[in-house]
């Protein structure tokens, strides 16, 4: 990764979240600026922002021309956002004037920002800076790691001291999918990620990969209780 981490340096690497067992919890993969796709997915489960919680695994911006509207909608429904590599590119481009980040960003779907006011972009950047690189969620007796991606060896209870290693590992790494192998994943019962495009969600070790929105697909929306029930039935947990 040749992209700097000046803007993202102060972002929290990990956030601990506990949610009551009675609440419905949903996790959605990369949205790529597609607001209609998000609304369609939420409508299928009668999502209620007053009682349900939605976690977004990063890359909710870019490619779609509704990026700002989608971002605003996610704020309205109080979605829990985790940063992905596209959010990283946006922050370094706009806040750090990183030329390498800006080229990669605009070459990969970031041109929507040219049609949004600088005031709105400032609001987005300031809010993105409050979002973590990962979440460890406690729900229904399980610890679940949530991040855009993750490396083959990772300890969810003990992160590296070097922020650049954390950013590379949780926002950019593709080795788990390339090698189809998790070497070590400690500190959680299982984890869920986006980033690696796939036609259908798939497991590698105790990690679940759900980025199905790219290349004409639609985003995968998981109800976490269903995932847990399925794993319990298969005796994986």
Image (cartoon, grey):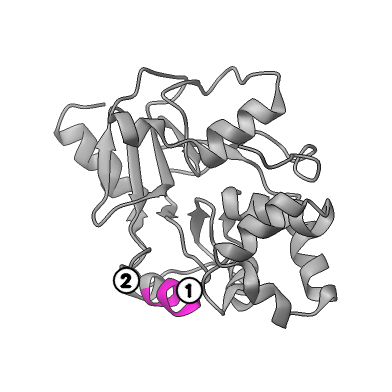
Give the residue displayed 49% in from the left and 44% down from the top.
20
Q: Is residue 187 above or below residue 39?
A: above
Q: Note whether 195 is above or below 150 in the view shown.
A: below
The percent position of residue 93, horizontal first and vertical second, equals: 75, 56
Lower sequence index among marks 2 and 1:
1
Picture coordinates of residue 26, whole percent (x, y)? 42, 55
Q: Picture quarter containing residue 180?
A: top left
Residue found 37% across the figure and 63% down from its top: 214
Give the spatial CA distance, label 2 vs label 1: 11 Å
Judged left or right of residue 92, residue 21 is left
* Residue drawn at 47 percent across, 33 percent down: 150
Q: Which residue is mark 1?
A: 34
SS of the residue under disc 1: loop
Quadrant containing the N terminus is: top right
Q: Residue 36 at x, y = what percent?
A: 44, 80
In the image, residue 52 lies in the stretch drawn in magenta: no
Does residue 69 show up? yes
Q: How many marks?
A: 2
Q: Please provide percent x and percent y for residue 166.
A: 62, 29
The quarter of the displayed image where residue 42 is located: bottom left
Q: Eyeballing the image, is 27 above or below 161?
A: below
- The magenta-colored residue range is 35-40
Residue at 36% in and 31% down: 176
Tell me, yes or no, whether the highlighted magenta stretch contains residue 36. Answer: yes
Give the vertical position of 78 relative to 40 (above or below): above
Q: Quadrant of residue 158?
A: top right
The residue mark sitting in front, 2 or 1, is 2
Q: Residue under circle 2? A: 216
Dominant SS of magenta comes to helix
Classify mark 1: residues with Cα within 10 Å, few (<14), some (14-19) or many (20+).
many
């Amino acid at each position: 990764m040749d992209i700097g981490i000046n803007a993202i340096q102060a972002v929290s690497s990990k956030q601990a979240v506990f949610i009551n067992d009675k609440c419905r919890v949903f996790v959605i993969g990369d949205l790529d600026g597609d607001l209609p796709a998000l609304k369609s997915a939420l409508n299928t489960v009668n999502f209620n922002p007053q009682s349900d919680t939605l976690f977004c695994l990063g890359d909710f911006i870019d490619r779609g021309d509704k990026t700002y509207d989608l971002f605003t909608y996610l704020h309205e429904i109080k979605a829990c956002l985790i940063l992905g590599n596209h959010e990283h590119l946006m922050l370094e481009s706009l806040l750090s004037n990183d030329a390498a980040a800006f080229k990669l960003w605009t070459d990969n779907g970031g041109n929507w920002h040219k049609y949004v006011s600088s005031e709105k972009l400032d609001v987005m950047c300031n809010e993105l800076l409050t979002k973590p690189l990962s979440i460890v969620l406690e729900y229904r007796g399980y610890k679940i790691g949530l991040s855009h991606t993750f490396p083959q060896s990772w300890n969810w209870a003990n992160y590296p001291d070097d922020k650049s290693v954390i950013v590379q590992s949780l926002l950019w790494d593709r080795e788990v999918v390339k090698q189809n192998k998790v070497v070590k994943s400690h500190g959680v019962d299982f984890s869920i990620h986006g980033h690696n495009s796939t036609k259908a969600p798939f497991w590698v070790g105790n990690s679940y990969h759900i980025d199905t929105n790219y290349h004409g697909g639609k985003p995968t929306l998981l109800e976490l209780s269903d995932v847990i029930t399925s794993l319990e039935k298969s005796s994986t947990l």
